[in-house]
Image (cartoon, rainbow, N blue to C red):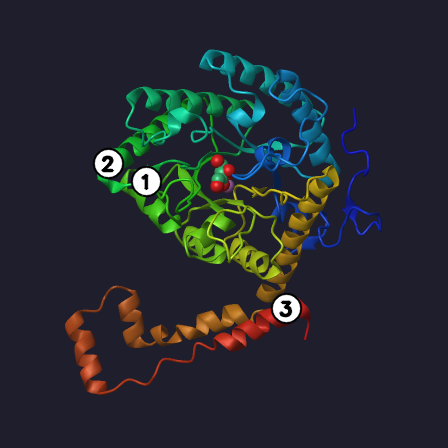
């Protein structure tokens, strides 16, 4: 059965109603194919499961794919529709939560059996295609048992259920050849400190992550584990607030060798940071792994998970990614159509928008790097540290007394060189819109 019969394979500037204007997979940018710079992934949950329900109303889109929702026949139809979707768009990766794949049963043993069945089917579909799994994860926030979190729960029994779900999600990720495994700490945080032992909860979260690493390595998982920072929503405060916080946590609990960051654009802005900031902080700490490619709305205080459209943001994101030498993970569209964009055609328009926004971002970021003035400016900006006293400081050979003597001899320093922000922004605009 063909689910999306209104389009065949979407190509570059074909003149057809569904076409890429910028994403040209084989085009070489800075020595690598665009498709290698941009390992796009489909998010199973938004694309194949979510129908647009919100707090005020039910879904508007039909994601039944011709089957009864909540059955294994529906789970299989989603696999078929998902593979047709990815093949038509030339998307090479997918990401999933355990319960995106199958309906959750009352008994975890039955859920696990369903997961075995569907992962056999996905594996079968993968054969003969170049589609792979980017990462898997366990949904440890939706079921009522996780009302107080998974690793951070006050219930030892619920903690064991979280362990069981992670074990199974890791099994399936490995079975499908996943590059990574994600921890998004959905409800790992608190609503009020009046009922919360923060130290106890953080130790338990770290304990669960250690067990996941031990088990994953035992079953042959060679990829990266990821933390996906997010400051709030659904909880008032989430422990993985932002990249700096999550990296500190990983180091504190000895998890930093096995984990990297999965940075989501909308989570960055919820934390009061730019997307670029979160990518930079991860990269300078050697922990930039993967990206959830979406965008938020600066006027709204929640996670809107929009398809990326803002080319300034994708350009600066790709600038960071190129400077970091690329991603070990990929660009997962953790994004959903707006509720009134409910048709199957809208699903294609959304992915084309997102893929083109990142392709254009890549082209423009490469132009900024190749043009060279921004990078040269940054190098020059610190050139005072190339002098004798500067080198001593950088090499850790200076003492406070020596620097004090140096300063007192000078009496008064010159002002630091200009930051020239407007000049740099003008260079970015020229790269984006031409001289
Ligand atoms: C929620 C979110 C998740 C994670 C995976 O804000 O981003 O979908 O990406 O659990
Ligand atoms: Co996400």
Q: Quadrant of the N terminus?
A: top right
Residue, x 52% and y 25% (percent of image)?
Answer: 99
Examine the image and state in which quarter residue 433 appears. bottom right
Camera-side mark, 2 or 3 = 2
Q: Is residue 135 visible?
A: yes
Residue behind mark 2: 195
Disc number for residue 431: 3
Q: Quadrant of the C terminus?
A: bottom right
Q: Nearer the viewer, residue 315 or 32?
A: 315
Q: Secondary structure at mark 2?
A: helix
The answer to whether 342 is drawn above or below residue 432 in the figure is above
Tell me the CA gap for discs 2 and 1: 9 Å
Q: Is residue 198 left or right of residue 290?
A: left
The local crowd at label 3, few if under 14, some if 14 to 19, many if 20 or more residues have their Cα within 10 Å, is some
Residue, x 72% and y 52% (percent of image)?
Answer: 27
Residue behind mark 1: 191
Where residue 25 appears, x then y in whole percent? 71, 47
Labelled pair 2, 1 in contact (Cβ < 8 Å)? yes
């Amino acid at each position: 059965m063909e689910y999306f019969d209104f389009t065949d394979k979407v190509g570059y500037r074909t003149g057809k109603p569904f076409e890429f204007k910028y994403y040209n997979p084989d085009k070489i940018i800075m020595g690598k194919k665009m498709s290698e710079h941009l390992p796009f992934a489909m998010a199973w949950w938004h694309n194949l499961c979510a129908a647009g329900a919100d707090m005020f109303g039910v879904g508007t889109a039909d994601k039944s794919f011709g089957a009864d929702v909540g059955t294994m026949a529906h789970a299989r139809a989603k696999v078929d529709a998902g593979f047709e979707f990815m093949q038509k768009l030339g998307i090479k990766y997918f990401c999933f939560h355990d319960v995106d794949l199958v309906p959750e049963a009352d008994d975890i043993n039955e859920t696990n059996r369903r997961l075995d069945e569907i992962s056999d089917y996905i594996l079968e579909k993968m054969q003969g295609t170049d589609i792979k799994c980017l990462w898997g994860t366990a949904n440890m926030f939706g079921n009522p048992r996780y009302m107080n979190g998974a690793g951070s729960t006050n219930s030892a029994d619920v903690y064991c259920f979280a362990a069981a779900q992670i074990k199974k999600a890791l099994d399936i990720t490995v079975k499908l050849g996943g590059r990574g495994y994600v921890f998004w700490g959905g409800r790992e945080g608190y609503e009020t400190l009046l009922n919360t032992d923060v130290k106890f909860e953080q130790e338990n979260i770290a304990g669960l992550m250690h067990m996941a690493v031990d088990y994953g390595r035992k079953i042959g998982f060679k990829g990266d584990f990821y933390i996906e920072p997010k400051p709030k929503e659904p909880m008032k405060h989430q422990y993985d607030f932002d990249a700096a916080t999550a990296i500190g946590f990983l180091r504190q609990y000895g998890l930093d060798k096995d984990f990297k960051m999965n940075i989501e654009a909308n989570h960055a802005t919820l934390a009061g940071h730019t997307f670029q900031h979160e990518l930079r902080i991860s990269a300078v700490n050697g922990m930039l792994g993967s990206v959830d490619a979406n965008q938020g709305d600066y006027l709204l205080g929640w996670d809107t998970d929009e398809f990326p459209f803002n080319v300034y943001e994708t350009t600066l994101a790709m600038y960071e990614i190129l400077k970091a030498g690329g991603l070990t993970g990929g660009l997962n569209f953790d994004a959903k159509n707006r509720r009134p964009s409910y048709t199957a055609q809208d699903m294609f328009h959304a992915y084309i928008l997102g893929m083109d926004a990142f392709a254009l971002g890549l082209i423009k970021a490469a132009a900024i790097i190749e043009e060279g003035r921004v990078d040269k400016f940054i190098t020059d900006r610190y050139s005072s540290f190339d002098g004798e006293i500067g080198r001593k400081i950088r090499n850790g050979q200076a003492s406070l007394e020596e620097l004090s003597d140096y300063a007192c001899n000078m009496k008064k320093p010159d002002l630091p060189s200009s930051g020239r922000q407007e000049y740099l922004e003008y260079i970015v605009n020229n790269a984006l819109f031409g001289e």
